[in-house]
């Protein structure tokens, strides 16, 4: 089997390390999953201590090669500089799939119900009342539910951008009925505030904005901006 | 890569002796899933949720796995599908957001996160820049084997190509990658 050149191997090993989760990442996801699936499915001892069993660990020799490539010659830094300079500053970064980069850089999405930033020891449901989560949605159908959420909110988005705020509001209300604590609930609230402002219903919009769990998120900022302009 | 037959059981409680427990699968494959999700372009702030979602699906369907020795490619199939669903949801969010307030939008775009800046200068950024030079089929098999640690037969199964094709494509991909890297390094020396 033909293999990569030493430089290539070193670069790959180094990139693989960059893709690996940290201990904190593992802890957070473990805690959230335990809250969703129950401790029986994911015993505390098993979850976070798996690093040694994993197939992703880099060989020490690759590590040295990577260090040589990245630090020793300063070559990689030069390449990185090239990468930085190659595109115009506003262009998307080039090292991830286009699809991931076509969106605004800041997180538009509020963290969905599981609140991943919760400390590992906390029960995730404490951070926000989540009827949907408390009811432990059947995992097999969650994907379908998300697809439905997406369909409804896409319709609302089209209607909003087409200037039909009343129709958008109907779609958003439909989403609220079907998915009160859905994955896209935060986006729904922000979009609702926008639609309400477009209809001149400012106090309702304010109330909607006050319910955002991430009042400083970009989508919240957008909603406020729309409302300011509408007044 | 789960079949229609796998739709039946939502619980994940149907244990089978020939399969590892969910906890064991989680312990063994957490890093694999996480890094695949990152590599497939899910932004860092969404990684937790996408990875959780993937393990929820694994939990519910593990007992339906027909070929236990194909566990990793089965998991990778779930990773791909979940990431794809996540992208659809994200596009919807973006569409909702982009409906309004162009000036806010431009303000948001102007602020790359520290992580993005860091990544742009690290090995991952360099690697991805080089991979951009490969055509899609070569890039895909290169990533599966070199970055995700899949075996060539596993990659062939995922990509649905004959094993011989997978081997020759991988060989060509490695050559193309090394050539691209050598070119970069040479260019740097000249400067």
Image: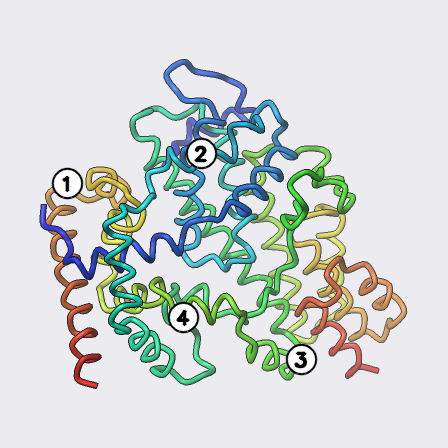
Q: Position of residue A82 (x, y in %)?
A: 31, 80
Q: Do pointers 4 and 1 mark residues of a single chain?
A: yes
Q: Chain of mark 2?
A: A
Depth check: give the residue in front, A195 or B80: B80
| Measured Cα–Cα span from mark 1 to mark 2 | 31 Å
Q: Do pointers 4 and 2 mark residues of a single chain?
A: no
- Report helix, strand or loop for mark 1: helix
Q: Which residue is mark 3?
A: B101
- Report helix, strand or loop for mark 4: helix
Graded by Cα atoms within 10 Å as few (under 14), some (14 to 19) or many (20 or more), the crowding at tag 2 reads some
Q: Do pointers 1 and 3 mark residues of a single chain?
A: yes
Q: Chain of mark 4?
A: B
First reached walking from the N terminus: tag 4 or tag 1: 4
Q: Chain of mark 3?
A: B
Q: How is the image coloured?
A: rainbow
Q: Nearer the viewer, mark 4 or mark 3?
A: 4
* Quadrant (top left, top right, bottom left, bottom right) of the N terminus of chain B: top left
- Vertical arrangement, residue B186 with respect to residue A2, above or below: below
Q: Nearer the viewer, mark 3 or mark 2?
A: 2
Q: Position of residue A79 (x, y in %)?
A: 29, 75
- Horizontally, residue A68 falls left or right of residue A155, namely left
Q: Which residue is mark 4?
A: B120
Q: Are marks 4 and 3 in contact (CB under 8 Å)?
A: no
Q: Which residue is mark 2?
A: A50
- Report helix, strand or loop for mark 3: loop
Q: Which residue is mark 1?
A: B163
Q: Position of residue A99 (x, y in %)?
A: 43, 64
Q: Are marks 1 and 2 in contact (CB under 8 Å)?
A: no
Graded by Cα atoms within 10 Å as few (under 14), some (14 to 19) or many (20 or more), the crowding at tag 3 reads some
Q: Do pointers 4 and 3 mark residues of a single chain?
A: yes
| Measured Cα–Cα span from mark 4 to mark 1 | 35 Å
| Measured Cα–Cα span from mark 4 to mark 2 | 29 Å
């Amino acid at each position: 089997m033909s293999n990569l050149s030493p430089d290539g191997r070193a670069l790959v090993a180094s990139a693989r390390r960059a893709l690996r989760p940290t201990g904190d990442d593992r802890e957070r996801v473990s805690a959230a999953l335990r809250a969703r699936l129950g401790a029986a499915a994911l015993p505390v001892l098993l979850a976070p201590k798996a690093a040694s069993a994993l197939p992703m660990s880099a060989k020490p020799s690759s590590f040295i090669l990577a260090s040589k490539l990245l630090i020793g010659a300063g070559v990689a830094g030069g390449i990185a500089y090239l990468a930085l300079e190659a595109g115009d500053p506003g262009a998307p970064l080039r090292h991830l799939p286009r699809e991931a980069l076509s969106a605004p850089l800041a997180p538009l999405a509020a963290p969905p119900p599981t609140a991943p930033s919760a400390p590992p020891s906390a029960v995730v449901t404490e951070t926000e009342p989540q009827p949907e989560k408390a009811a432990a949605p059947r995992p097999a159908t969650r994907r379908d539910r998300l697809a439905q959420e997406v369909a409804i909110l896409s319709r609302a988005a089209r209607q909003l951008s087409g200037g039909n705020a009343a129709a958008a509001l109907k779609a958003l209300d439909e989403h609220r009925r079907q998915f009160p604590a859905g994955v896209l609930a935060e986006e729904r609230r922000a979009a609702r505030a926008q639609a309400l402002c477009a209809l001149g219903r400012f106090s309702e919009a304010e109330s909607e904005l006050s319910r955002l769990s991430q009042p400083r998120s970009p989508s919240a900022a957008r909603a406020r901006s729309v409302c300011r302009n509408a007044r | 890569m789960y079949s229609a037959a796998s739709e039946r059981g939502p619980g994940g409680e149907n244990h089978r002796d020939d399969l590892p427990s969910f906890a064991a699968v989680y312990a063994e494959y957490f890093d694999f899933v996480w890094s695949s999700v990152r590599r497939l372009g899910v932004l860092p702030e969404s990684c937790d949720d996408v990875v959780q979602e993937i393990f929820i699906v694994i939990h519910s369907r593990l007992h339906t796995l027909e070929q236990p020795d194909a566990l990793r490619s089965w998991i990778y199939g779930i990773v791909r599908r979940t990431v794809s669903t996540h992208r659809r949801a994200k596009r919807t969010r973006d569409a909702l957001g982009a409906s309004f307030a162009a000036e806010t939008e431009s303000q948001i775009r102007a602020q790359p996160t520290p992580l993005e800046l860091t990544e742009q200068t690290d090995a991952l950024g360099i690697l991805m820049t080089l991979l951009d030079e490969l055509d899609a089929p070569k890039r895909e098999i290169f990533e599966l084997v070199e970055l995700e640690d899949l075996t060539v037969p596993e990659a062939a199964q995922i990509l649905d190509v004959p094993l011989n094709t997978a081997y020759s494509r991988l060989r060509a991909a490695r050559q193309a990658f090394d050539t691209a890297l050598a070119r970069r390094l040479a260019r740097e020396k000249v400067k």
